[in-house]
Amino acid sequence: MATLSIGLPIYNGAAHVRNCLDSVLNQTFQDFEIFISDNASTDGTQQICEEFTRKDSRIKYVRQTENIGAPGNFRFVFEQTSSPLFKWMAHDDWIDPDWLSKLVPLALEQRAIVFGHLQMATYDGVDMAHQANCRKMEYKGHALRRQITYAIEPANLGKANIIYGVFPRDAITERSFEIFSGFGAPGDVMMLTDCLRQFPILFAGPTRLYKRAAQPRAPGAIKEKRPSVFERTMVSQFMTLEPPSFRIAFLACYPVAVARMKFERKIRRILSRRFES
């Protein structure tokens, strides 16, 4: 059995999955398996993935007969693997060659969820300025403290991307999937908040996961309405999480969450101007 299982849920990822898989296969740490679940893609995803299975016996590929939704596909790749450590991989992300060699030993030694640095990139794969870049995302100490520290952190600092870190397998439970699928878009943040009740999130050092930005809107496309501060701080979602002590502590710290959100918005504007110039 491999030390690490990598689950790759994918839908219409032909444009980027080759770069993703190459970055995994080029890791200095090699004791892993890759399980790909194709969510009934309609592009060339199947052909590319089958090409990789012929190259490397560690890669398994399954094509769903119908689209089972993103949460269902995330669950499927987890349930089809059994290694003591687990990692999700997004088909349009890629990682530094030492990502696994830095994260895996720490996850085993400390029995913790482990992440490195995040580097935002344009849709075309070019590094871009962003306040989430190269932050030390670490949440440790008492369980409630680490939950609250994570919850009040602005979402635009990249905390949702820890879902692509390395997990001890037992950190991901049936409850994790219920939360992940029950909250829609912020399900990853809610799941990680719940995981922090039992496991810390540790920083493994300066190795990067590259997160590709969404494809730019077509000219003339209708701009989406900006979410309110309440929506961006996810207050309604956090107020449904257990235990009650978490909800009380979150309410007490909520003014800090709002202040940080407004401050980080200003920083983002400054970075955007510098990047554009």
Image (cartoon, helix red, strand yellow):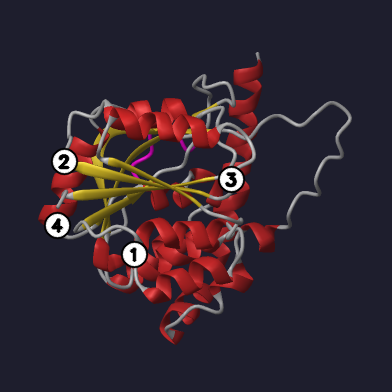
Label 3 environment density (alpha carbons within 10 Å; few <14, some 14–19, many ≥20): few
Relative to the observer, which residue lies in front, 172 or 68?
A: 68
Please tell me which of labels 3 and 2 falls first in the chain.
Answer: 2
Q: Which structural element holds mark 2?
A: loop
Picture layout, residue 33 above or below residue 126: below
Picture layout, residue 32 above or below residue 249: above
Residue 73, percent from left and from top: 49, 57
Picture quadrant of residue 265: top right
Q: Which structural element holds mark 3?
A: helix
* Distance Cα–Cα, label 1 vs label 4: 16 Å
Determine which residue is flagged by label 1.
146
Question: Which portion, as a residue range, is magenta?
Answer: 132-137
Q: Residue at x 49, y 78 (%)?
A: 241
Please tell me which of labels 4 and 2 falls first in the chain.
Answer: 2
Relative to the observer, which residue lies in front, 146 or 210?
A: 210
Residue 14 forms part of the magenta stretch: no
* Distance Cα–Cα, label 3 vs label 2: 42 Å
